[in-house]
Image (cartoon, grey):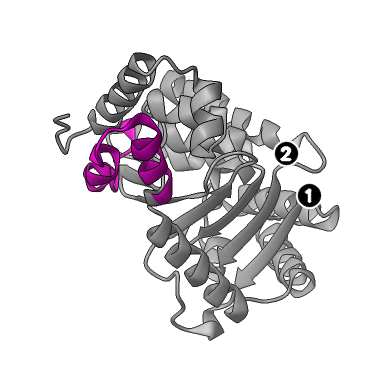
Amino acid sequence: MAIEDNPQSRERYGEELRSRREAAGLTQEELSQRAIMTRTHIAHIEAGRRRPSADDARRLDQVLGTGGIFERFLPTLDGRKVAEHFEAAKEMEQQASVIRQYAATLVPGVLQTEAYARAVFQSGFPPKTDEECDKALVTRLGRARILDDPKSPVMWTMLDEAVLRRHVGGPAAMAHQLRHIAELGDRRRVRVHVLPFGAGAHALLESMVSLMWFEDLPPVVYVEGWNTGKVLDLPSVVQQGMAAYDLALGDALSHRRSLALIRSVAEEYEREAQ
């Protein structure tokens, strides 16, 4: 099985798994029972959406009698780049049961209000037309539908104080945006923590991070930079991401104190808007 280290690696890995499974005369359900995996996880692997853990790959090799090829080719799947920079992460966001995110400079997309999001889109390069901004807004605001369910996903949002202080869209837009976050926090739909400037350096200083857990699939980490993003699901990397998040959370304000700060900054913007 030759799998190159390129964007098609997972698809080719999945095609090979499906071919070997069918050659063995097994359904996805039968393979899942023998390899001690969920049928859904196997379906995602075969579709090129997810990678197995090292233990999963070893069990697949054992059940299918493939001589270790699925374990040997795991390294070629590490650090897949996301097509269209967020598309894969957006799909996972809709499936997640728990999301813990850290924002370094901007309000996370799923929490953005229309005025705030429009200001973000209008500041990019190359500049977007009004029509392009409108289309992008439909997608951005549509992501917030995951909060319509009162319980799932469970969402924690950690905001650097810079997110609160950076003027995006003007004082009125900022006041409305922060009031929106505070309202979600007040009704416990989102647990909010602010990392104050006084905390200094912290474990997540270098990047936006989103950790996602699922009912029947392994967790992933999504990290993002300028015009690029990566979904990382290598177990050791995911564990490092969880540990870094926990360390940064230890430096953040409590939920109650964070909401008080957010409301205070919103009042400052409201006075400025007047």
Residue shown at the point (55%, 28%) measured from the top left: 39
Q: Nearer the viewer, residue 43 or 67?
A: 67
Q: On screen, 177 above or below 137?
A: below
* Drawn side of residue 183 relative to residue 139, left or right: right
Is residue 135 shown above or below 190? above
CA distance separating discs 2 and 1: 7 Å
Quadrant housing the N terminus: top left
- Residue 91 in view in this figure: no
- Give the amino acid type for the residue marked by disc 2 in the picture: Leu
Q: Looking at numbered disc 1 in the image, what kind of residue is underneath it?
A: Arg
| Residue 66 appears in the picture as rendered | yes
- Image location of residue 219, percent across then percent down: 52, 49
Q: Which mark is residue 189?
A: 1
Badge 1: how crowded within 10 Å, few (<14), some, or many (20+)? many
Q: Is there a contact, CB below 8 Å, between mark 2 and mark 1?
A: yes
Q: Is residue 95 magenta?
A: no
Q: Quadrant of residue 16?
A: top left
Name the secondary structure under disc 2.
helix
Tell me the residue that label 2 is attached to: 147
Give the vertical position of 116 relative to 190 (above or below).
Answer: above
- Residue 194, image x, y percentages: 63, 69
Q: Secondary structure at mark 1?
A: loop
Q: Is residue 44 above or below residue 226?
A: above
Q: Residue at x 73, y 59 (%)?
A: 191
